[in-house]
Structures are given as structure tokens and as C-alpha cells.
Image (cartoon, rainbow, N blue to C red):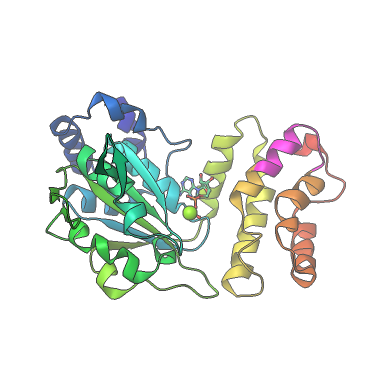
Amino acid sequence: MKELQFLEEQGVSPKLIQEVESFRKAHTVSDEVKNRIVKPPIPFYGKEILEMAIAALLQGENVLLSGSKATGKNILAENLAWIFCRPSYNISFNVNTDSSTLIGTDTFIDNEVRLRKGPVYQCAVNGGFGIFDEINMAKNDAVSVLHATLDYRRIIDVPGYDKIELHPAARFIGTMNYGYAGTKELNEALVSRFLVIDMPPLTETVLMRILKENFPDAREEGLKHFAGLFLDLQLKAQNSEISTKPMDLRGMIGALKTVRAGLTPRTAITMGITNKSFDIFEKEIIGDIVMTRIPEEWTRDEVF
Ligand SMILES: Nc1ncnc2c1ncn2[C@@H]1O[C@H](COP(=O)(O)OP(=O)(O)O)[C@@H](O)[C@H]1O
Ligand SMILES: [Mg+2]
């Protein structure tokens, strides 16, 4: 299958790919939710991580992706839904998340009280992949409503309504920012319902692939400076010398776009990276790192 070629190219185990293909054949998707099968903007790079996640999901497990900022947790989750060809349901968790935002709320329809189905409910019925984004940000007791959904029972039990069983293709993928500086923990009961993948920091190889994928028209030498800058920032954040705010790959990609449009690399990086920090001392440290990687006199021509 051509859609899975990027797995082959990365050397993902052929046996796993075959099993994914069987999974896709075994579970069709109804027409109403086909528009929820979304091709991710970029393939996920990382053979071992892909193999771990695919193997777990094939076995019916839910997966929790934990790791620092910009380790590709969300892009991996989107890739997995795409690999398994399932409709995806993205749910951002925050302090206000409760059972009604997840499962549904009572509403009046035609003079009777009915459940307006929330994303977890829809995911369960349609055999979707539910992406619980930053799952650790929710209050623990609020998400205890998911216990029966996430363990072997595979049900949603809403008081006053019929119990529903999860579609056999339904899976849940949680993401959790595990910062260098301190993390809101997830409670044990919830963690025990996932297999956990600790996402590794970006390497130069992966970074260069991401940058080249986004900027096929850029010069390799120029991109190397940007990758080097990102790795420097990552290291400083690991050592708690700076926060993770400037470790912003989306910002770096945005900056490169403005270089392509004609800005100087230094100005672009100031907008995309340096200014992400609002602390003057930190900004100074970032400025020093930027200085060693992105020469002030550089113009667009050094990069494109
Ligand atoms: N291994 C990877 N493969 C492909 N893209 C990646 C990878 N790691 C990070 N990225 C890129 O980094 C950016 C941030 O990724 P994201 O998934 O939002 O990170 P996180 O959710 O861990 O903070 C995206 O633009 C994504 O494309
Ligand atoms: Mg994320």
C-alpha cells in the first residue's frame, strides 16, 4: 500500500506493516466520518518509536507519549491515526475538562432530553483514534470517568444512558509534556491504562530531515546552521540554563519562511525564536547562542 511507503523507507519491520495492512482491511470507516481521516503535514521520523507505537496499538493497547516540547508527540499521534486509517478526534485537556466535555452533555432535542455526544463518545462509536492532548493538564478526578473506557472493559458508562462498547478499532493516544523544569503528574490509575513511550530529544539527523522536508529549496549548509541553533537551545534547556520557550521548532520553520520571503536570517530568528522569551536575562543568553550560529551579515542568499 503506497500510503505506508514511508514506514518501509524508514525500515519499520515488514511484519508490523503487514499487520497494519490487515487491520486496515478488517476495519472499514463509515462515510460520515471519512473526512476525519487526515493526512499529517509531515511524516514522523523515528523507526524505533514508530515500531513501539504500532505494535502497542495493534495489540489493542492505548499509548501515552511523554516527552519534552517539540519531540513530535502530536505529529506522531496524527501519523498513527493516518497509518491505521482511522478517523481522529483531537481533545485538548485543561483544568476545565470534565466528563461532559469528554463524553457528552444533556440537551433538549424534540422535547426530550438526549445526550449530545462528546468526542470520546463519537470516537468510541466510529472506531476512531482519540488524541488526548496534554492529558496531564486535566484534573485527575475529572478524567476518572475514562477508566472503564481505557482498560480491558472498553466501555463508556454514562449514568442514565445505555452502556456502550467501544468499536474494536477505537484507540486512545495521550500526550504529556514532560518538561525539564517541572511537570504536572498524571495519576497512577490513569498511567496504568497506557503503554508509555518516552519521546527522545531531536537529533541532528531528524532535524535536518524535518527542515529539508519543509524547505526542499533551501541550501543544506544554511539549514545546518538553523539545526545547530535548535540543538544548542535544546541542550541549554536540558541543563535548565533556559526555559523551553525558545525551543520552538514551529517558530524556526516560520522564521525560515520569512527568510525565503527576503528577511535576513538574524531578523527572522529574532521573531521566530529569541522573542519567544519575555525574560530579559534569558533573552540575552538566547541572543548569545544565536550570534554563534546565525551571522548578522547573512542574507537570504546564504539559506536559499
Ligand atoms: N520525529 C519527528 N518527525 C517529524 N516531525 C517532527 C518530529 N519531531 C518533531 N517534529 C516537528 O516538530 C514540530 C513540533 O512537533 P509536535 O508534534 O507539535 O511536538 P510536541 O507535541 O511534542 O510538542 C512539528 O512541526 C513537527 O513536524
Ligand atoms: Mg504537543
At which x and y percent is residue 281? 78, 72
At which x and y percent is residue 29? 22, 30
Compared to residue 48, the image places residue 37 above or below, namely above
Compared to residue 226, the image places residue 258 above or below, namely above
Q: Is residue 259 magenta?
A: yes
Residue drawn at the location 40% of the way across and 73% of the way down: 185
Q: Nearer the viewer, residue 172 or 218?
A: 172
Q: Nearer the viewer, residue 85 or 90?
A: 90
Q: Is residue 107 left or right of residue 204?
A: left
* Magenta residue span: 254-264
Compared to residue 32, the image places residue 124 above or below, namely below
Kindly indicate the quadrant of the structure image that contains residue 283: bottom right
At which x and y percent is residue 17? 23, 39
Residue drawn at the location 18% of the way across and 29% of the way down: 28
Compared to residue 57, the image places residue 127 above or below, namely above
Q: Nearer the viewer, residue 235 or 72?
A: 72
Instruction: Specify the quadrant that holds the N terminus.
Output: top left
